[in-house]
Image (cartoon, rainbow, N blue to C red):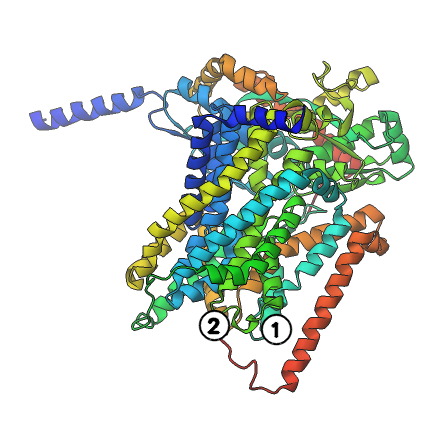
Amino acid sequence: MSFVDSIAAGLSLVGNIEAFLALFLGVAIGVIGGAIPGMSATMAVALTLPFTFAMQPITGILLLLGVYKGGIFGGAIPAILIKTPGTPASSATILDGYPMAEKGEAGRALGMALWASCTADVISNLSLILFAGWLASFALSFGPPEFFTLILFSLTIIAGVSGESLLRGALSALLGLLLATIGLDLVYGTNRFTFGDPNMMGGLNFIAVLIGLFAIPEILAMVWHPTAHVGKARRLGKNWVSFAEYRRSFKSIVRGSFIGVFLGSIPGIGAAPSAFLSYSEARRTSKNRENFGKGEIEGVAASEAGNNGVAGATLIPLLALGVPGDVITAIIIGAFMIHGLQPGPMMFILNVDIIYGLFIGLIVSSVFLFVIGSVAIRGFKYVADVPKRILIPAVLVLCIYGVFAVNNNIFDVGVMFVMGWVGFLMMRFHIPAAPFLIAFILGPLLEDNFRQSMLMSGSDPSILVRGPITWFFWAMTFVTIIAIVRAGVRAVRTGPAFGQKPEG
Amino acid sequence: MTFKTLGAICALSLGLAGAAMAEYPERPINMVIPYGAGGATDISARTIAEPLGAAVGKPLVMANVTGAGGATGSVAVQNANADGYTMLFARVGSHSVNPAMKATLPYTLEDFRFVTVYEINPFACVVSANSDLASMEDVLARAQAGELSFSSSGVGSGPHLAAAMVLDAFGLEDAANAATHIPQQGGGAAATAVLNGTADFLCTNSSALAGFVANGQMRALMVTTAEPVAGFDAPTAASLGHPELEQMVGWTGIAGPAGLPDDVAAKWAEWMEAAAADADFVEKMEARGSIIRVMAPEEANDFIQTQYETFRKLVDDLGMRIEG
């Protein structure tokens, strides 16, 4: 079958009103679901799944993909407006998005989030269509040792998001690593720090920790000091992102998109680390690096490009290998199987019409995302105008419901409040929360892959330098650490005037 | 006795009689799925929920309570009222492998009463298509040389026990330690580990492997059912001389807390009969490689108890019990 035939076959599958309607509906559900704190893209996809059972395979899968893509973008809306990531992937967006909203620039931040997301989406989809086979074989050369070195390198992000004090960032990261050890030991299956409570056996719920760390401290601060915000301009205004700003951030967006494509095509990492990596790379190379963390629009662009770049690319291992890359694609792969489709190399031969139908649908989904995202921003941006004394209690209720709904477990709500106090204390002592989160995500991956490597080699550490991929990441790690140390030394030399503005 | 009190007594006794006669179920039933959305248990549960809901006549409220290999959701049902309004989708991992292996699990089989097992999943053992292992003898030879590694979806999971059981049956000395177990986080990762060469060997649900085998990425060496499994060009355990491995199958069932009344269990037996007769349900499940076999409450309890005891003995023989 020639390329044109394939496209024609694909078109004949998706070229009907139901398929496009499902896709459109999916993106809309995703954006709304992602925008509700605690709901998360994962849950939006899980809730939509049963509705697809009765649909045509391609229609059902397009619906789910729409929800996925919409959800990853939608998470940015509450991250910017109320400092609560709607979905873990948008945690990095908080770093600059929320300070922008505080300055009364929520409209600009949201606009940039949308533009960056859509650009990354297009790049990610094109990478899927053009390089799926190549990237998939690359992903298969990623065993535990390669993973370990990649995660080790990713931990250097902590330096990029620590703000003014690297030491405080490291402290925060240590706390995150420590809490990530709670739960079942991967290799021996024994309980670690569970104190005999079955609720702790699964580890601390990620969404509960996330919301506790970011949203609850704001609420506690409001209780502590109810009138602190009075007199601060927090209006949305009529501001909107300008094309000049988009062009200025374009390099970061493209870089972030490719980071997303790269990390997305490797099963097991997910969108949140990609967003943080993209953010820290943008900060490292930007002319405005001093402004990062204080409301820099390029930071919003980079993190949103990083997480949306993953969305198309996670379909690479799914379609080419039949392997789910993260929790969401695991659900989507379930939908394939329900319809009797078996993703994998044979699908490109047996069901080429479905593959090309999906490709066409994905391209269209970027356009839908832009349209629905613009409408959603217009609707949601008035949240920024709601007085804080009304907004904050509403956020609290949403957080409690959202965290409960993730697992239908009241224990998670308790975790959220405890983490809220931890986050509040960290805020009071100017300890940044982002390194905590990165360490909490990456810590278990680092540990598991290290131990798997050791199991593979019979405890011979030379497996950690077994091939070019590991060499590459070792080199990257050393270069970054040297750069961090040099920047630190320079900061000390230039005297205390620089770097002495601890900002919460 | 005044007319008023008489009236009150009449009303009360009528009310009581009404309450006693009220048929179970009067209100929606909470169904706990102890694993995440999109997993084998979740899909199975949501597929049967449709015909089952019609048979029950009241809504079934499906909730995924996930964590700790199914333990979190199982505990939620263990602690619920035994009135039949909180039921659990139990699975081979949460209710026979895990109790057999983990000493510190907060529940035992005695804490549950099974009302049915409705689905059986054959297990298959696979290697990567690039592997030079062509038969179970090759696998055994490599294991005896101390060079075999196998992946699983975690310590105390079905695939962990299955690999040890299979190697033990084929005569490997000290099967739990002679081969290297490389646990992964979840079933998808376990399959990926075989594909990318992290591990050599994997035994798990045939439905989780069907795609890889059909796509020529993996090669099946054995299935554990008495009959060959469609799509798997591999001998059965019995034909290789190990019919005892037929115990190693996955299943999904429904359980309530231990004190579940007999009439509730009887109701469930009726409903399951009706639900499993639904042609659409059977077709969907069989397309995914499951075998539909509805067991009555008694039969289900016996089935699980037997499997648990087999596993328990194996775990003790091989010293695989997790005490910490």
Q: Which residue is mark 1?
A: A166
**Do discs 1 and 2 share a chain?**
yes
Q: Is residue A489 above or below residue A65?
A: below
Extreme front residue here? A4
- Cα separation, mark 1 vs mark 2, equals 14 Å
Along the line of sight, the residue nearer the viewer: B302 or A100: A100
Residue at 28% x, 59% y: name it.
Answer: A390
Residue B11 at x, y percent in the picture: 17, 24
Residue at 56% x, 56% y: name it.
Answer: A253
Residue A71 at x, y percent in the picture: 47, 45
Q: Is residue B301 above or below residue B312?
A: above
Residue B304 at x, y percent in the picture: 62, 25
Q: Residues within 10 Å of mark 1 (few under 14, many from 20)?
A: some
Q: Is residue B186 above or below residue B41?
A: below
Left or right relative to A272: residue B154: right
Left or right relative to A382: residue A320: right
Label 2 is placed on what type of residue? Gly
Q: Which residue is mark 2?
A: A504
